[in-house]
């Protein structure tokens, strides 16, 4: 039985809620373990077509890591903490072929900002705050923040935010390209569901290839164009491609099956 997250599935959308509101949903070892299990379910459960991550309560998505766990760590312990989170949670979210969306309510700081950035896109409530304040602890982001923040908002602003530890509000995050949409808090999940409703009507195999190719572009893969050619060609062998083309010619909506 989960101690720190709750999950629910409706219409193929798997809602993962980090449920430590009294700790502003801070990430600790148990949360990472249980998030890893939930992310694994998204990858392996065919009933799940997309996933949403959010935080319990109105104050925080995830307000960072549980700092009380840091005090006993040495260099090797810090590396293990970072690697486990990256390998088992953050990278698996980023590379999941099914859409992963962060519904950001309140503070998304440190590991919380990194968790949101690992998702394919982010919808923020108007009260959201983002930041990578690890420098205030004598640290740097350890769950991919140095890489993903730079990819999303550019080198100069990423440098500034990480060096100063400054927080930005939802409007600034939207202006910088860190979030895709801003909503009122009460409309946050309904906006996410609306977006996913549109995406889930598309071809699942094509969605998965989009994730793969865009991630290659984000890391500057020099073979990205060649890999796009391969992926484009592979999709011609799918039933969904034939259905999509036929539906277009017949002037009807396609019915995709993920085959």
Image (cartoon, rainbow, N blue to C red):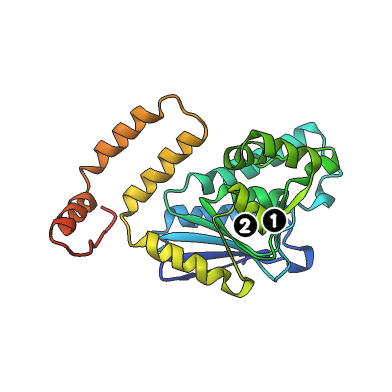
Residue 1 at what x, y percent from top left? Answer: 62, 67
Residue 247 at what x, y percent from top left? Answer: 17, 59
Structural distance between the alpha carbons of marks 2 and 1: 6 Å
Residue located 44% across and 40% down the image: 214
Residue 245 at what x, y percent from top left? Answer: 18, 52
* Left or right of 46 on screen, residue 133: right
**Vertical position of residue 135 compared to residue 33: above or below:** above
Structural crowding at the residue carrying mark 1, measured as other residues with C-alpha within 10 Å and reported as few (<14), some (14–19) or many (≥20)? few
Residue 112 appears anywhere in the view? yes
**Vertical position of residue 222 compared to residue 136: above or below:** above
Provide the residue designation for mark 1: 30
Give the residue furthest to the bottom.
186
Query: For the residue labelled by badge 2, is the local secondary structure a helix, a strand or a loop?
Result: helix
Residue 115 at what x, y percent from top left? Answer: 63, 51
Provide the residue designation for mark 2: 34
Please count the marks in the image. 2
* Left or right of 3 on screen, residue 42: left
């Amino acid at each position: 039985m989960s101690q720190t997250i709750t999950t629910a599935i409706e219409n193929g959308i798997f809602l993962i809620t980090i449920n430590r509101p009294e700790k502003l949903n801070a990430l600790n070892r148990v949360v990472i373990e249980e998030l890893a299990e939930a992310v694994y379910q998204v990858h392996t459960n065919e009933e799940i077509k997309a996933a949403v991550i959010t935080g319990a309560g109105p104050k925080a998505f995830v307000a960072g890591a549980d700092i009380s766990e840091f005090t006993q760590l040495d260099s090797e312990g810090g590396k293990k903490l970072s690697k486990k989170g990256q390998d088992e949670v953050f990278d698996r979210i980023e590379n999941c072929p099914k859409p992963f969306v962060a519904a950001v309510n309140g503070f998304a700081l440190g590991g919380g900002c990194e968790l949101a950035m690992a998702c394919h896109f982010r919808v923020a409530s108007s009260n959201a705050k983002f930041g990578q304040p690890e420098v205030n602890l004598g640290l740097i982001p350890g769950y991919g923040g140095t890489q993903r923040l730079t990819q999303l908002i550019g080198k100069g602003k990423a440098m500034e935010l990480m060096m100063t530890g400054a927080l930005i509000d939802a409007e600034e995050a939207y202006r910088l390209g860190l979030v895709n949409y801003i909503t009122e808090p009460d409309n946050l999940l309904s906006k996410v569901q609306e977006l996913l409703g549109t995406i889930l009507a598309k071809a699942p195999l094509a969605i998965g290839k989009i994730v793969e190719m865009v991630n290659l572009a984000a890391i500057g893969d020099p073979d990205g164009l060649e890999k796009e050619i391969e992926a484009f060609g592979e999709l011609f062998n799918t039933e969904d491609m034939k259905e999509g083309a036929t539906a277009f010619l017949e002037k009807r909506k396609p019915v995709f099956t993920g085959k």
